[in-house]
Amino acid sequence: MGMSGNLVQHMPLSLLYASVDSIKAGLAIDIVDVRLHPGNWEDIISGKVTPDTVLIGVSVITGTPIKNALEITHWAKNKYPHIGIVWGGPHATFNGREIMDDPSIDFAVSGYGSLTLSLLARNLINEPGAPELSEIKGLFYREEGVVRENLPEAKFEMFDYRDIPYHLIEKDMDLYGQLDNGERIFSIYSAMGCPYNCAFCSSPAQYKNIKRKYEPIPAAEVVDHIAYVHNVYRASYIYFIDDDSFVDIRHVENIIDEIRQRGLSVHLGFRGARINEIKKMSDEYLGKLAQAGTNIFHIGAESGSQAILDRINKNCTVEDITEVNRKMARHPEITAAYNWIVGLPEETPHDLELTRKLILRILRDNPKAIIFIPNKYRPLPGTALYDIALKHGYTKPRRIEDWIEIEAESDYCPPWYSKKTAKIIHMMQIASFFIDDKINKVDIGNTFRFKVARLAAFLYGPIAKIRFKYGITALLIEYKIFYWASGVFAKQENK
């Protein structure tokens, strides 16, 4: 998952959610987080397989994780040919049929997986009253050698927090976190879905058949959840993993009012915040969030080109972005961390130049801001930009293995990239790690990898800033060196 994936390791919330209905049905389920056991996952999985095991599930996101998923799958099918293998997660949701081309994969789940997984397991153990495979929504399966597909259920997967089986990962909780900063981080939802229609985003495609695209969870229930993980599992940081937390800014205000009334001492972070939403927030509102413990907003700025912002349906202007950034600068307790997307079909070098200049302006106006690495656009079936990508020569990978290199931080270059475009993007990506002095802004640990990161920032940071300031892309040998080194470093940690 690139360098970013090496620095942040949150608990596997998707696996916990996928377990809920199986546990309710009385089925035994275990979780093995291979990220935590890269050197001995085979032994750990083998230790959990019993004569009654009917399924081994693998949650997969697109890109580098597919390599690990295939390794696990082929090992498991070779060792336990009688046990079903099911893939779920984002990659299966959008590419289930192609996944089934691998004979080691018996099933794939599209969309939310908890009920589907439970019904599938009950079918495999021949439980009386269990549905036929053809009746299980969201399931890909084979029937007489032919792949069959059942459409997923058109509703959100929402659970009472008391049903989330945190006990399955309790022994590993100290291993999760980000930047080695010592916080015990719990990712939770305050709302499900997203009503917006960003042209590059998977959410509109995933939620297209759901009538109501956004469902907030009542504030009291959200804070009940926070209080539970704080009191029982010593959670010190709550990371709202919503697609968008601020569709109704009063919803979050109600949550922080409830947190304050209960006297809960936790830090808060928000993954989903849009420019058009922050525009509605008063300074008083932001001050209230800061007082409640909020220390970061992940903000989707995406581009410095108005043409691109319009094309991807961001509902904002470049001036809106600069206005919001100046507002955030007045509240330094909350770090404004900006997301970007580059390499879109029909995006020109001039558009990228505008994005580079906007990033520089953001850092001038708000020195505490953080710039996340610009993500390379990856075409997703069902999204508004997908047909445009096809017109520009994009061919969807046919083999699972071909998806491994299609990574936001990889060397992957779609057919519409010119050599100039590729150089600009690579320069922006490598420089983005250093231009904002993030190594000195965030609370990180003192492990070997962060000592190396500090040394790299000290040695290369000045060069990165010059490159980015003036748009210098010549002799960009450090791009290859950086990603080679990060790969080597990741392998060393995996031993």
Image (tube, grey):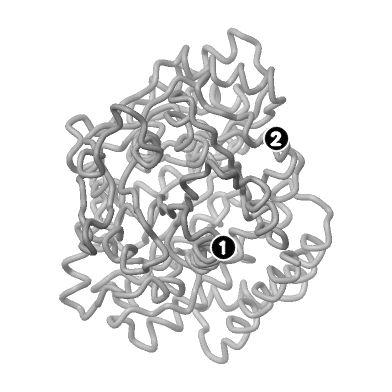
Tag of residue 79: 1
The answer to which of 49 and 281 lies nearer the viewer is 49
Identify which amino acid the numbered label 2 is placed on: Arg
Residue at x-position 53% and y-position 90%: 474
Query: Do the residues bearing badges 1 and 2 touch, measured as CB atoms within 8 Å?
Result: no
316 and 18: which one is in front? Answer: 18
Q: Quadrant of the N terminus?
A: bottom right
Give the number of callouts. Answer: 2
The residue under the point 52% across, 13% down is: 257
Q: Which disc number belongs to residue 184? A: 2
Q: In whole angstroms, how far apart are the C-alphas of marks 1 and 2?
A: 36 Å
In the rendered image, residue 31, in percent from the top left (x then y), is placed at 59, 42
Amino acid at dot 1:
Lys
The location of residue 454, given as percent across then percent down, is 78, 64
At numbered mark 1, what does the secondary structure look like: helix, strand or loop? Answer: helix
Residue 22 position (above or below residue 95)? above
Label 1 crowd bin: few (<14), some (14–19), many (20+), radius 10 Å: few
Asked if residue 229 is positioned above or below residue 193 in the image, the reply reads above
* Quarter of the image with the C terminus in it: bottom right
Q: Is residue 373 visible to us here?
A: no
> Is residue 248 or residue 108 the one in the foreground?
108
Give the residue displayed 32% in from the left and 40% down from the top: 276
Q: Quadrant of residue 377?
A: bottom left
Q: Position of residue 467 (x, y in %)?
A: 57, 78
Q: Earlier in the sequence, mark 1 or mark 2?
A: 1
The residue lying at 28 percent from left, 81 percent from top is: 416
Q: Secondary structure at mark 2?
A: loop
Residue 215 screen position, x and y as percent: 31, 26
Q: Examine the rendering and report whether any part of residue 393 can be seen.
A: yes
Q: Residue 223: give its label.
A: none
